[in-house]
Image (spheres, helix red, strand yellow):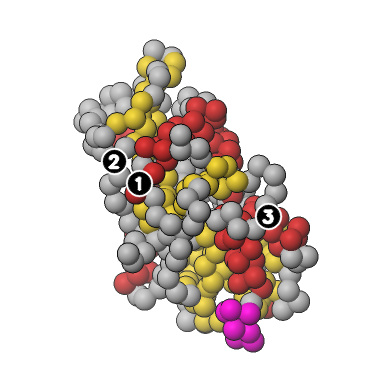
Amino acid sequence: MSSPEFAYRVSPYRFIARYRNGKWEEGHLSTDENVILNESACVLQYSQNVFEGLKARKTEDGRIIVFRPDRNAARMKDSCIRMAMPPYPEDLFLKAVDDVIRANADVIPLCTDGSSFYLRPFMFGTDPVLGVRPASEYEFRIFGSPVGRYFSRMIKLRICDLDRVAPHGTGHVKAGLNYAMSLYAITEAHALGYDENLYLDSATRTYIEETGGANIFFITKEGKLVTPKSDTILPSITRDSILAVASGYLGIETEERPIALEEIKEFAECGLCGTAAVISPVESIDDHGTVYRFFSDVTEEESVTAKIKKVLTEMQEGAHPSPEGWLHEVTLT
């Protein structure tokens, strides 16, 4: 069987829990993939929603493992607080992840060729509102979809003239409205032959932030891993993991700091990182006609990026020792 695309494919079961009268009701599994909403539901009128993304992987010996799901639970809690939503309890979040995986175990692909079972926890305001205010009722759901690689080749980026988020806004939380801001720009980028947009900081437009769907990192000519530090980018679980892998397992020096756009000509390698992208090498960045290319002095397979990706991927698949607590195995019985 060929590896699936990175696209939605309906699975038999999903988890649903509702918040009413100031408390979360007991959740349950459902075979119905449809959501029914009032026309004036808060999520439809004022985009009050948050979401997460994590992957379950089935190993060749039949185990199903999830990579750092506790971090997703904690990040979703932070997103909810920022969006004036009642956080779904972290312990119940983790239990719901397990329930969805167990119920859909038969459709989870082997973790070969980058395949996995992508889990999408999300929450949204459901009751009708007309004046601008938070909802008082919410729905938390998790569905899963068998997926393949997000990027199947080296990526071409362009510097985008539009802004992804505002200073002191919501760029640091995983809210749908941040991604809606990028839809016009990504459509334009694809039409021009680019895979993604690279956004600069909205305040000064001189520092590199992230793309519409992933964090970014660079490798210097000396072999150091450098990644942007900013209050307006999403705190990526994958980025945190590659920093730990690079420094703790490969002896690579790492640094988180603001990265000026003018520095990109000095870097030897570049990559995107995230749950969907995992680690995806970047071929080039186009800054309004000035194209900066990477991996010119080393093959992709021999690069520092490839070494980090190999160890991280093996950790995610349970084939390499990882820090305590990073892997969660789902018991199927």
Instruction: Name which quarter of the figure residue 281 lies in.
Output: bottom right
Instruction: Find disc 2 in the rendering and name its residue.
Output: 12
Residue shown at the point (50%, 27%) measured from the top left: 92
Reading the image, the residue beneath label 1 is 106
Mark 1 nearby-residue class (10 Å; few <14, some 14–19, many ≥20): few
Local SS, label 2: loop
Indicate which disc, 1 or 3, sits on the residue closer to the N terminus: 1
Residue 286 in magenta stretch = no
Res 138 quadrant in image: top left
- Between the residue at mark 1 and the residue at mark 3, the CA separation in whole angstroms equals 27 Å
Residue 297 falls within the magenta-colored stretch: yes
Tag 1's secondary structure? helix
Which residue is located at x 74 percent, y 69 percent? 224
What are the residue bounds of the magenta stretch?
Answer: 295-302
Q: Amino acid at mark 2?
A: Pro
| Cβ atoms at labels 2 and 1 below 8 Å apart | yes
Q: Give residue 321's mark.
A: 3
What's the amino acid at mark 3? Pro
The x, y position of residue 1, in whole percent, is 32, 64
State the image coordinates of residue 320 (x, y, percent, origin top left). Answer: 64, 58
Dots 1, 3 in contact, CB < 8 A: no
**Between 282 and 251, which is closer to the camera in this rendering?**
251
Discs 3, 2 touching: Cβ within 8 Å:
no
Q: Amino acid at mark 1?
A: Asp
Q: Is residue 180 left or right of residue 92?
A: left
